[in-house]
């Protein structure tokens, strides 16, 4: 019974993480649009600000996705444990395959260029 309560709590945490990821994706989309508008109008000070915000949002989104994956793996472990201890068929739940993807930080290039320019001007 305790495992079932833990499983329910983990599923609630997983659902919350998914909704947070979706919210962060909408914020990221809005910032992408603002960055595009700032680049079209030539507002460099806003471009830097939006790139910094995007970098923070992408980092936070990555962290939440990693947390969601850890919670999901715990959900799978608990569900396998519950299925093995319950009477009946011993069905095993297969884990989802992790997708490895290279994420490029859009703030890295402008920051590196600014650093190089400031270093050379000294």
Image: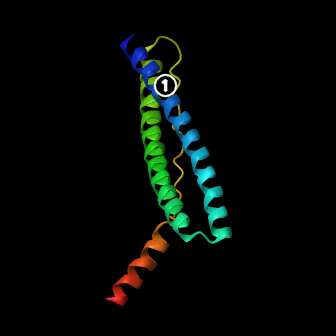
Residue at left 50%, top 66%?
A: 48
Picture coordinates of residue 65, whole percent (x, y): 48, 44
Vertical arrangement, residue 68 with respect to residue 28, above or below: above
Tally the numbered discs: 1
Q: Nearer the viewer, residue 53 or 96?
A: 53
Location of mark 1 (residue): 11
The reply to whether residue 120 is in sight is yes
Picture coordinates of residue 40, whole percent (x, y): 68, 69
Q: Nearer the viewer, residue 87 or 116?
A: 116
Quadrant of image for the C terminus: bottom left
Residue at left 43%, top 15%?
A: 4
The reply to whether residue 103 is in sight is no
Q: Residue furthest left?
A: 122
Quadrant of image for the N terminus: top left
Residue at left 43%, top 72%?
A: 111
* Corner quadrant of residue 117: bottom left
Picture coordinates of residue 77, whole percent (x, y): 42, 30
Query: Colour mode?
Result: rainbow
Vertical arrangement, residue 33 with respect to residue 92, above or below: below
Q: Nearer the viewer, residue 26 or 45?
A: 45
Residue at left 41%, top 15%?
A: 5
Question: Which element carries disc 1, helix, strand or loop?
Answer: helix
Vertical arrangement, residue 98 with respect to residue 36, above or below: above
């Amino acid at each position: 019974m305790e495992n079932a309560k833990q499983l329910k709590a983990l599923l609630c945490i997983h659902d919350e993480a998914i909704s947070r990821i979706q919210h962060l994706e909408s914020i990221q989309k809005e910032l992408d649009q603002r960055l595009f508008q700032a680049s079209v109008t030539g507002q460099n000070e806003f471009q830097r600000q939006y790139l910094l915000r995007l970098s923070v949002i992408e980092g936070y989104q990555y962290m939440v996705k990693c947390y969601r994956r850890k919670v999901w793996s715990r959900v799978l472990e608990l569900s396998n444990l519950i299925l093995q201890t319950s009477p009946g068929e011993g069905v095993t739940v297969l884990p989802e395959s992790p997708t490895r993807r290279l994420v490029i930080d859009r703030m890295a290039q402008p920051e590196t260029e600014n650093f190089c320019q400031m270093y050379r001007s000294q």
